[in-house]
Image (cartoon, rainbow, N blue to C red):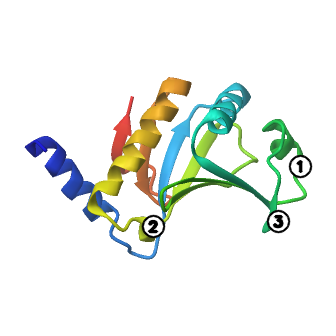
Amino acid sequence: MDNTNNDLEVKFNKFLEYDGSLRDILIEKTELNDWKLLYDYLLRSDYKIEYIKDNAKQSLPKNIELLFEDKDHTHTLSIQEENIIFNIHMFFDLSRIEIDIDPRDFVANEQYQIIINFMKNINNILSKKIIITNENDHNNIFYSIN
């Protein structure tokens, strides 16, 4: 591993130290088509995906529009790689995609690469800037992919 990767690993692992809050992956300036592209990608990917409606596991919806149309229930898409879970909850705002991660999921130093690869994969699909920040601290970007 070169020094650049080692520095990034050290910084990411410091960023992922648990402090009681989640971390946010955020894609802004999105529209319904971006959500569709992301959802279609996730369905075709090797990620383990679960859909939770009102805290109960359900079969995956045929299309993402159904989640935005159903305002009477809560919806979560959980995307898992190894022991890392990425959660999408905000199906009321088409203009941004926010994905939560819990720092407690990270049990090995090199697992920060899972975040970077996840962000790169989404960037390849959407061609939009993707950032990761502390929870609800979107002005202080820790890492981004353009």
Identity, as a three-letter code, of the amino acid under mark 1: Asp
The residue singled out by tag 3 in the image is: 54
Camera-side residue of 16 and 58: 58
Cα gap from disc 2 to disc 3, whole angstroms: 23 Å
The picture places residue 40, in percent across and down from the top left corner, at 69, 31
Residue 105: assigned label: 2
Would residue 94 be found to the left or right of residue 112 on screen? Answer: right
Q: Quarter-wise, where is residue 95 in the image?
A: top right
Residue drawn at x 35%, y 56% is: 111
What amino acid type is highlighted by mark number 2?
A: Asp
The local secondary structure at tag 3 comes to loop
Name the amino acid, label 3: Asp
Sequence order check: which comes first, mark 2 or mark 1? 1
Helix, strand or loop at label 1? It is: loop
Q: Position of residue 81 (x, y in %)?
A: 51, 52
Nearer the camera: disc 2 or disc 1: 2
Residue in view at x 27 percent, y 61 percent: 109
